[in-house]
Amino acid sequence: MQKYFFAKPVLREACFIIAIATLLGLTANFFNPKGVSLGFRAPTIKYAPDDVFAQELPVAGIGNPEDELSAQHEAVEPALISTRQVRHLLDQNQAILIDARLSEHFEKGHIPGAHNIPFERFYEYEERIQSLPKDKWLITYCDGPPCELGEMLAYELFHRGFPMVAIYQAGLDDWNLTPSVEKGGRSFEK
Amino acid sequence: MKNNTRALLILLLRIFLGGIFIYAGIGKMIRPDLFVIDIDNYRLLPYLLVSMLAVILPWVEFVCGVLLFAGRWLRGASLLLVVMNVVFILAIGSAMARGLDISCGCFSLGTEGATVGWQRLGEDIVFLAGSLLILKDSAERIT
């Protein structure tokens, strides 16, 4: 009998707490720029349109503030790129893939032809980063959501003066759904 | 003396757990867009429930943490913490059993958060035990 009487106020308190939390949560979500879209399906990723990647590639030397061509070219903030767009750029030899994961993960399997610059050890790869070409798209990736190493590496490269950087957010998980994944080496030396 | 010691222990437990869940809630309520990914990665729920949880759960944690601190509505708050911790333990256990290498979404988000594993499981068991003690104590004070 006592347990029964205890249960009712407990449940009432719990319901009030949930109601208050729901109200606060929905209100905060409405005003939060990083709020979640409430719906039956996850929002689809908004990839950059094809013409972003179709623009004429800058001549080598872009990024040098004294270079006239560099001054004329407008750097594109890292854009989200789809698997189809990645394949197209690779086929045209207009891109380099950069795997942002740690070396041990890279060696277990990576997209064929990708280079490895682990974001978490970024500062150990300074020389190699400076030797990256500025006349090709640098496409960073990691495993896929929720991994954000690719995005973080992309912005780091962009802020260091690389004008053509893209984020392959779907990453290795999506690439694994298609042809083979390469294993083993081809990592940049430190 | 025994009652005083017990009351002090419960107070310390309330402060400890209250702080834990306030901290956990704040981290997630700032970035619900990352927390929704963490929940979705468990592959247990449809997206609508995932998105609702991402919006509401951090606030439930935060409010329960505040109530534990304040010593108000202890029964309801501790019951919710018991339920949440049971769910977290089951979710983490399920992810481990399926070999999912994902962020647990416990205190921090995305790649910054620790992955699911025995440590996270152990922590949630400790929190569950603490919540049960507070619930039991609040029940005994009423009855």
Image: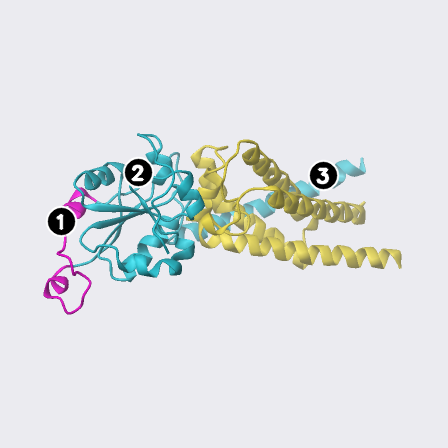
Q: Secondary structure at mark 1?
A: loop
Circles 1, 3 touching at the beta carbon (< 8 Å): no
Is residue A53 one of those drawn in magenta? yes
Chain painted yellow: B
Q: What residue range appears in magenta?
A: A49-73
- The quadrant of the rendering that contains the C terminus of chain B is top right
Left/right placement of residue B94 relative to residue A45 reads right
Q: Position of residue A155 (x, y in %)?
A: 32, 56
Please tell me which residue lies in front, B26 or A119: A119
Disc count in the image? 3
| Label whose residue precedes the other's in the sequence (1 or 2) | 1
Q: Secondary structure at mark 3?
A: helix
Q: Which mark is residue A112?
A: 2
Chain painted cyan: A
Q: Amino acid at mark 2?
A: Pro
* Location of mark 3 (residue): A7
- Which chain does tag 3 point to? A
Please tell me which residue lies in front, A41 or A99: A99
Q: Position of residue B112 (x, y in %)?
A: 48, 52
Q: Amino acid at mark 1?
A: Gln
Task: Please tell me whether the stretch drawn in magenta is mainly helix, strand or loop.
Answer: loop
Mark in front: 1 vs 2: 2
Local packing at callout 2 (Cα closer than 10 Å; few below 14, some 14-19, many 20+) is few
Please tell me which residue lies in front, B32 or A114: A114
